[in-house]
Image (cartoon, helix red, strand yellow):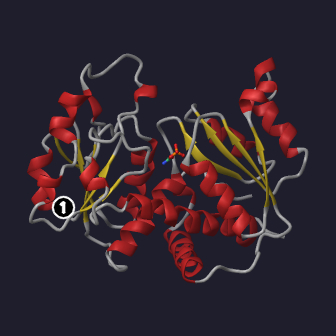
Amino acid sequence: MQHLVDVDNFTIEEIDKILDDAASFKLKMPPKLLENKLIITLFFEASTRTRSSFEVAAKRLGASVVHLDPAKSSTKKGETLNDTFANLCAMAPDGVILRHSENESAKILANMNLAPVINAGTGNLAHPTQALLDLFTIKEHFKGKIEGKKIAIVGDIINSRVASSSIKLYKKMGLDVTLVAPKEFMPKSDLKQSDKLEDVLDRVDLIISLRAQLERHKKPIFEDYGEYAKHYCITKDMLEGRDLAIMHPGPVMRNIDISDDVLESNSSLVLKQVSNGVFVRMAVLKHLLLDSNGN
Ligand code: CP
């Protein structure tokens, strides 16, 4: 049984196939490939994009979707995650999509091997479909030529599950990544690092900005995010005379991560990421529910 716990569950060939399928779905909506499939979504943390994107992707492919709201489930009566999952799997879904605060939760459920588990964001460790849709958006932006493209990841990298999955994926796919953050947000890494955004602006082709993951900070790291923004917010003057594309997985902290005018400019690929997310998640669902686990 194949799961998507993190990007390393897929080979380069599988990633290329998923990106190709997503591109073809974007050109022309496919037939209802998952018409007889049932997917359960289980989101223990808030989500605007990922949950709705998976649901739209599943429905575009004809699958049925059942959402269990943990706030109104027997989790409230002390039921464990493993028991909740086992009970849902007793209803024979074709896949379970999980978002959870614990890093290992998707792996633990995947190891139970009751249904394909698709990680929709766990702890600060993994968000593989965000990494894949970001890669798709980068590839689309550079018209298919991504090898050696210079990407800066800027912000709260150490607490970001998007950064964690993306760094693995970008290394695997030959992108040249620089991490830009104050020391409080910088992870241990063998990648190029800088604490000064202005020093890397002339050396990169694209910037991925990240939100400060306040909900994962055990105590406040910066008292004043206005001060942080003076150094790390992507502003219009930084783009002046430079051909730089700006991405962000969302939600964006406006004028702290990215200024309003940059967000609304042609340099911003942020809403393209959201649109592309549906096609990439369609391709992931096709791969896991039909190509590799299908019957
Ligand atoms: N990018 C992302 O995971 O957004 P949501 O938290 O809204 O799903």
Residue lying furthest top: 219
Q: Is residue 260 left or right of residue 283?
A: left
Who's the residue at 51% across and 73% down the image?
19
Q: Secondary structure at mark 1?
A: loop
| Residue closer to the observer: 82 or 27 | 27
Q: Is residue 123 left or right of residue 285?
A: left
Who's the residue at 55% across and 35% down the image?
103
Q: Is mark 1 within 8 Å of ligand 1?
A: no
Residue 143, located in which quarter of the rendered image?
bottom left
Q: Is residue 80 left or right of residue 126?
A: right
Amino acid type at circle 1 is Val
Q: Position of residue 71 (x, y in %)?
A: 72, 28
Q: Which residue is mark 1?
A: 204
Query: In the rendered image, is residue 5 in sight?
Result: no
Query: In the rendered image, is residue 186 in sight?
Result: yes
| Residue closer to the observer: 283 or 50 | 50
* On-image quarter of the N terminus: bottom right
Total labels drawn? 1
Who's the residue at 56% across and 45% down the image?
48
Q: Position of residue 17 (x, y in %)?
A: 55, 76
* Other residues around mark 1 within 10 Å, as few (<14) / some (14–19) / many (≥20): some
Q: Position of residue 60 (x, y in %)?
A: 70, 68
| Residue closer to the observer: 276 or 217 | 276
| Residue closer to the observer: 238 or 191 | 238
